[in-house]
Every structure is written in C-alpha cells, then in structure tokens.
Image (spheres, rainbow, N blue to C red):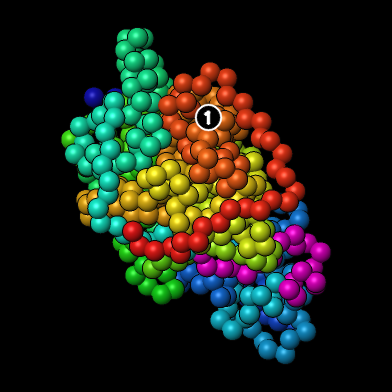
Amino acid sequence: MAQLAGIVWTLLVALSLVASQCSANKTPVVSYSTFSLVSGDGAGTVRALSSPPSRPAATGTNRIIVKLKSAHTDGLVRAGGISRALQAALSAETTVYTAETTIHHLNSLAMDVVDLPPGVDAAATCEAALLASDEIDVCEPDALVAPTSVRRLQRPAAAQDRWLPNDPVFEEQWGMASIDMPEAWAFLSEQQQETDSGADSVGNGTTVVGVIDGGVDYNHPDLKDAMWVNQGEIAGNGIDDDGNGFIDDIHGWAWCDGSSSPPTGDGDPMEKDGRTGTHSAGTIAATANNQEGIAGIAGVAFGRTTIMALKFLCGGRGSTSDAIQAINYAVAMGATLTSNGWGGMVRSAPNRALEAAIRKAEEANMLFVAAAGNTDNDNDGDMKHYPSSYELDSIISVGATNEDGEKASFSNYGLRSVDVFAPGTKIASTVPGGKYEAMRGTSMATPFVAGLAALLWSMDPTQSFRDIKHRILSTSEKMDSLEGLCVTGGQLNALTAVTCVDCKWTPTEAPTTTDFPTTTEAPTEE
C-alpha cells in the first residue's frame, strides 16, 4: 500500500510539473511591464510585472494606445521601443517626470496600452512621439464611447407565429415574428426530426458570442445556463490557473467595475449600472422552452451558443482602450463573434488602433456585429459612427426598424455604410436582477444579427465569417421602406437564412451621388 501511495504521489508531482510547464510556455493574453518616465535623462529600465498593477487603471485623459511598426511578440521588447519613443518625445520639456509608467501588453494584437503619469498630456505626448521616433506606427490618446441606447420602454407589442416556445414573455417578442424566427425554428425542428438523431444533427458546433458592453447578469434565470465558462480556470481561488494574464475569469472579464473612479478591472463581469449587455445577451441566447421569460434566437436546442461577458462600459461610458482589450481577450479565448452595441459619432479621422484590433479579430475568422448608431444620421456623410463605419469585411453594421417595418426614427442609415436592418423598438429581453424589460435602439437590433449568426455558425462550424456575413446579407428581406437606406435594402430574415442552400452575396455598385431619404421625425421616447 505504501508503495502504491508513493507511485500515485510521483504521478501527481509529474502531472503538476507538466501543467506548470505548459502554463509557463503559454503567452498570456495580457501581460504588464513598467518603467520610470524620466524626461531629459534617458530611458528608464523596463521590467516585467508578475501581476496586474495594484493602482487603478488610468482614465481616457492620460492613457495612450500604441502600436509599433515592428509588431514583436515579446511585450518587453515592445515596451523598450515605447520607452525610447516617450523619452525622446519628452526630451525637449523642462518638466521632469519620475512616476512609474505601466504598460498593458495586448499580446494577441501586438498592441500596447500605456498609463501615463498624472500631468502628462496624452494628445501632446502622441504627437511628439510620432515626430521623435520612427518605431511607432500608431499612437492615439484613449477616447470614451457610450452604448447606443439606454432608453427603456413600457409596453412591448405581442406576436404569435408557428413554432412557439413555452416562455411566457415570448408573446411580447414581436421582433422574432418580424424576422420569421418561429418559422426558422420550425424548419430546424423538422430537420432534426427527419434525421432522428437529436440536436447534433442540426447544431453540431458550439458558438461563443462575446458581448462587449456593460457586463451580463450571469445569474439571470434565463441566462445562467447560456454563459461561457473558462474551463482552464478554477473559480474563486485567486490564481491565474490558465496563465492567460487574468485571474478568475470564469465568464469573461470586466475592465471596469463601476464602483471606483477611475475604475478597476476584475474577473466579475456582472452588469451593475446598466442594462444593455444583459438585454443583448437575452436576445442572442436566453434559454428557450424553459417556461421562463423569453427565448433567445440561438437559445433553442438547435445550436449550442454561449455568452462571453466582456465588460468595458461603466456608468454609461467606456474607454476605447478597454474596448480594444475586450476584443483582444475575445480573440485569444476563442470567441466566434462579438456583439457590439456601442460607439460614437466622429467627423475627423477614426481611431486607427481600434480598427487594427478589429482587423486582427478578422484574421482570426471572427465576425464583428456593430450597432449603426441612434442619431438619425446618414453614416455615408462626413459624420460617421464608429466602430460600425470601419470599412472592414468582418463588420456587419446594423440599423433598427420599428413594428411597421420602417426605419426607426432614431436609427442611423447609409446606402454604403449600414449593411442591414433588424427590429430595434420595444424589444423585450432580459435585464439584471432576473427581470425583463423592453428597450429600443440599434444596440437592441444588433443582437438579432449576432444571434442569427451564432445559430448559422452552429449549423456548420467550418464556415468562415464571410460565409456567415454573405448568408445574412443575401437572404435579407427587401423592403420598399428601407430602399436606399442600407446596403441590402432590407431587414434580417431568419427563415431564408437557415434554408438557403447556396448563399452568395454580390452587392450592386452604389451610385456616386444619391439623394438619400431622411426622416423628419425627431427621435422621441415611444
């Protein structure tokens, strides 16, 4: 018996050594380093930090986003280049800075977020650094963005159609009937019955949707079974078990917690001071046929979709650098696509670092579904909405329709810059605290597209993001009311998307000059 115990002990020690070696060899999603920013006296010594910095993260006013021309995979090497550039930028100043500068290395994106010491102007620092150094490709001050809707509504409309789950609030989900979702579910149900082999016959792949927003109520009765779980992490032990640079990231990560100013980050992406993240998650994947609340598009038995909660909005706003870090996490942790109900209007040049982060996700075959914005704006004009207006293949820009199939009064539009419309008024879904509410906005329309994309992907996991995008755009339902307002001239249609055999999208060339229709009705509460 003693000999057997000794063998078992030896095996356990060997396995632990192998596990620790694997963790040591794995490049973390995010790592940290620091150096002293000393103007005029040469660069300080760059050194790695074994854990996230203890001080609160910087706000957008004194944080910069940097991408070097040589995208070295080693964070410390990149930190050295950044250190040299910043020292050169500050060499002409008379002020002497001695504070520690923390660098957040986004290793999946080969990009870095730098917390500048108090008193250092981010815009001026970037301008000087770009002039002083030939190592920097992108240097931009951090910026704040906001969710595309925080409006709440009172009385959702009712809808009934063919394949109806037993969820009591489903009759208020008019948007599902509008996109022929019950008919699509019925088709998938028939396919499943014909094969007589269970859900795997239709939904044979797991899709992970990263909801980049204000967090998700992962304890909500309609969402708790739909949450993504990081299998490499042990909950609550305070250890970075999987070596990805995040401690106790069970359901995702929070880059802000809403309780401190400036906000700190942790492994608890619970939505505390908003509703849009939980609301979006419900439309995408709330458990269907559980006699509870609502039914999510991909929350039925035909696909296996989970929600990765990526929280960067607190108090109704969030920083661009935190959005980039959320994208970085989604890429590294294997999300299939992301749902993004946030952004801002920009007249000047867009943020290149954010565009680079989305492009990196595109290279990882990730779809980026984005709200078109809520200012009744033509996004083809000088004023654009980002990130939805980036000209990247992986982005689907989503406008909002009302119950009459018309452009919602508040929704942005654009013959070239908005891809498709989806229901976006009086949308009933989950909100924190185990409750349900109706809201409106393009951020309510976006998860309709993200949910359908997840369901389509679960039908065939070998598809590329282009396959999914082409299927969604080519099967949209053309409407006279939406002609000239988006690329497809139509609204999302789930039935044609799931039944289409050979979906090819060949967009017609848009005219060079067009008088785009506008609405005269000002956005108002409905």
Residue shown at the point (58%, 78%) measured from the top left = 117
Task: Note whether 153 is above or below 470 in the view shown.
Answer: below
**Bounds of the magenta segment:** 127-145
Task: Note whether 192 is above or below 3 in the view shown.
Answer: above
Residue shown at the point (72%, 45%) measured from the top left = 511
Tell me if I can see residue 91 in this picture. Answer: yes
Task: Note whether 162 is above or below 93 in the view shown.
Answer: above
User: Residue 328, position in %: x, y?
Assistant: 55, 50
Q: Residue 76, located in which quarter of the rendered image?
A: bottom right
Element carrying mark 1: loop
Which amino acid type corresponds to the residue marked 1 in the rendered image? Thr
Q: How many marks?
A: 1
**321 left or right of 231 in image:** right
Residue nearer the viewer, 405 or 332: 405
Residue shown at the point (47%, 26%) measured from the top left = 496
User: Does 332 lie within the magenta span?
Assistant: no
Residue nearer the viewer, 292 or 26: 292
**485 left or right of 400 in image:** right
User: Residue 477, position in %: x, y?
Assistant: 50, 33
Q: Report the residue marked by disc 1.
A: 475
Crowd tier of the residue under label 1, counting other residues whose Cα lies within 10 Å: few below 14, some 14–19, many 20 or above: many
Task: Note whether 131 is above or below 507 in the view shown.
Answer: below
User: Residue 275, position in %: x, y?
Assistant: 33, 57
Tell me if I can see residue 200 in this picture. Answer: no
Q: Quadrant of the C terminus?
A: bottom left
User: Residue 377, position in %: x, y?
Assistant: 56, 59
Residue shown at the point (52%, 67%) measured from the top left = 144
Q: Quadrant of the N terminus?
A: top left
Q: Residue furthest bottom?
A: 94
User: Does 133 lie within the magenta span?
Assistant: yes
Residue nearer the viewer, 188 or 98: 188
